[in-house]
Amino acid sequence: MYIEIQRNAGASISDQIYQSIVDHIHSGLLQEGARLPSVRNQSKQLGVSLVTVVKAYKKLEDDNYIISVQGKGTFVTENKEREVLVEGTSPFDRQLAFQDYLPRAQFARFLHTSERIQLSSSMVDPGLLPTQWFEREISQILSRNPRVLSRYAEIQGDSQLRNAISQYLDNLGVTTTPEHILITNGTQQGLDLIARTFIGSGDVVVTEAPTYPGAIDVFRGRGATILSVPVDSEGIRVDLLQNICDKYKPKIIYTTAPFHNPTGTVMSLKRQRQILEIAQSIQCIIIEDDSSSEIYYEKKPPAPIKNRDTSGHVIYLKGLSKILAPGCRTGVLVASGSIFNRLYAAKANADLGNSLLTQKTILPLIESPKMQEHLRKLRIALKLRRDLVLALLSEHAPSGITWLVPQGGLNLWISLPSWMNADHLLIEAKKQQLNFLPGSACYPVEQENHHLRLSFSYVNENLLSEGIKILCTILHSGFSSKAMHERSPYF
């Protein structure tokens, strides 16, 4: 188990040990029943005092992440209701002796699950995607150009596709040229390329709170010190951001704009300008992660921050997989100057370029007027699903449950009473073949356990209705349990 200690970080060393072990547990890297190093061995491995490790372990045990068994050791437990099995050992337990450098990988744990009602991942219902178009297009591509499978694509991305995407981005308010575009394997690879290129151990990265958990995983993997700033109805709190930037001089500010993931709120033009001014004043890079600006429900959002970037401080990431073809894994990175050159080199080191076939597959639709028609129909269909969820929550959710009405995107952010734990709620939901993303995965620093993210875009209306009603029934049960026993319920 890899724990990186940053002695100049804002958090105490004991808190860093605590957070690292929590991240490992939530990511599934440390599973229930796994034995932790003894306090003495952990102290030697990390080069810290026994008192510091004891303090971290005590907090972990108080929060029910670990349990100490007299004479046997300290073991991971997922929650206080489960007993830890310590008698038997697996032949794979010895693998824990192999050092790794993965501090966190939470998002992958929730991305693909087996439950019948999938509300955990921001994917679009395959029935709403132009699948038949792509089936015909792949057949035609192979018929017209059978050698497409025997050629590598350009590392930067197919030139025809980059030309088409340049025009597509112009409609979104991002003016760029094909020379400044890098085709990536989804926005997740774009984040990874940026992190590998510009983030080293101890570098400060500022994110929103809550934020996209896949970004937290990537930044934590590079050893970054992550500081978070709350969001409100206009986006990231600039007053708090300014204070952090004055004190810590971050290397990167990460934002999911224009529609915030996971809350679905829209960053105002004023906030966009303020963030850009802050980044320019401290020579900081802004990563603008735009996964769904095309999916708006009331009105078109403001153009991205990149639209106002004249000095090259913004790296813009655009996802196309969700709205077109997840199997094609196509993302776009836009940058300029030496920043772009270094990211190009990182891409070459990573995979030497995306698949040519998948690039050629989405090209005709990107170029076609049918693209805008597809997006229009997608907005209508997803707005109906969003409104269905809002109506069902209004009718069935117990008093004390609140939610934000997303103005765009694929998610709904729900807040529970502070005594409710969404991680424990998920255990009950899974018993009824329902899943969602617990809000704890969306916070890089804070232990916020009383929120959850519902993605309403993947399942059909019938399953969506069933899932929301199941969730509300579980919530009512929690309130009843609290009233009956005058204590916090299991979930």
Image (cartoon, helix red, strand yellow):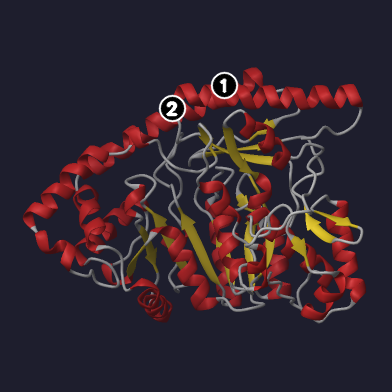
Q: Which of 399 and 166 is in front in this view?
A: 399
In this picture, residue 51 sits left or right of residue 3: right
**Position above or below: 152 against 469:** below
Q: Residue at x 49, y 40 (%)?
A: 410
Residue 434 percent coordinates (x, y): 58, 32
**Position above or below: 360 against 38:** above
In this picture, residue 46 sits left or right of residue 350: right
Q: Quadrant of the N terminus?
A: bottom right
Q: What residue type is labelled 1?
A: Ala
Q: Seen from this angle, which residue lies furthest top?
A: 395
**Secondary structure of residue under mark 2:** loop
Residue 411 percent coordinates (x, y): 53, 39
Q: Nearer the viewer, residue 45 or 180?
A: 45
Residue identified by numbered label 2: 460
Q: Which residue is drawn at 19% across and 62% down?
A: 160
Q: In which quarter of the image is the C terminus?
A: top right
Q: Nearer the viewer, residue 78 or 406?
A: 78
Residue 16 percent coordinates (x, y): 77, 68
Residue 126 visible, this angle: yes
Give the image quarter of residue 40: bottom right
Residue 212 visible, this angle: no
Q: Which amino acid does label 2 sit on?
A: Asn
Residue identified by numbered label 1: 391
Q: Which residue is drawn at 20% across and 51% down?
A: 367
Give the image quarter of residue 247: bottom right
**Secondary structure of residue under mark 1:** helix
In this picture, residue 12 sits left or right of residue 393: right
